[in-house]
Amino acid sequence: MFWSIVLFAGIGLLMVILAIPMILGKVTPNSVYGFRTKKTLSDPEIWYPANAYAGKWLLAWGVVMMVAALLLPILLPDLSEDSYAALFVLVVLGGLFVVVLMCWRYLKKLN
């Protein structure tokens, strides 16, 4: 169980690390990293605010994931490692769905 916790907390930490340059406007338009859509890639005036917004959501979700990775074994001590992994995958996918949904909603507000 220890390595599962480390892996899932590490994924949350990775999201936090990836979010910070987006929030700070350090990620230039590119085809690999950031909130990439036709609209954001076509205009830097849209890219930077959209990526800053996405970065804030990604940062928040990374923190939630790290906390969940640490708290799930405490709150559910009888959980098997396989169940923990399955539950955490659901947490990750559910959270990413919310992040993407919120970013798309924000993108519609930009020009």
Image: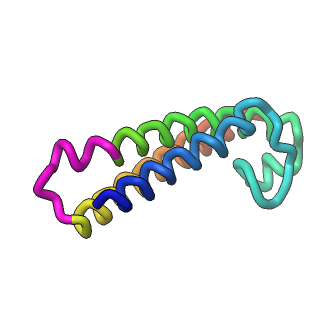
Identify which residue is drawn at 26% across, 60% down.
84
Q: Is residue 40 above or below residue 85?
A: above
Q: Nearer the viewer, residue 70 or 86?
A: 70
Q: Position of residue 36 (x, y in %)?
A: 74, 53
Looking at the image, the residue that sits furthest to the left is 78
- Horizontal side of residue 18 vs 58, given as left or right: right
For the C terminus, which image quadrant? top right
Question: Does the magenta run of residues contain 54?
Answer: no
Q: Left or right: 101 with respect to 76?
A: right
Colour setting: rainbow
- Of residue 104 and residue 60, the one placed in the foreground of this image is 60
Q: Quadrant of residue 68?
A: top left
Q: Quadrant of residue 110?
A: top right
Report the label total: 0
Instruction: Tell which residue pokes out farthest to the front in this image.
Output: 2
Q: Is residue 76 magenta?
A: yes
Q: Which residue sits at x=42%, y=43%?
A: 66
> Relative to residue 75, is residue 17 drawn left or right?
right
Residue at figure coordinates x 77%, y 60% from the top left: 32
Near-viewer residue (6 or 101)? 6
Can you give x and y, in whole percent of width and height, for residue 89 in the image? 37, 61
Where is residue 49? Give x, y as percent: 75, 32
Magenta residues, start to end: 70-80
Residue that appears at 50% across and 42% down: 62
- Give x and y (percent) for residue 1: 28, 61
Residue found farthest to the bottom: 82
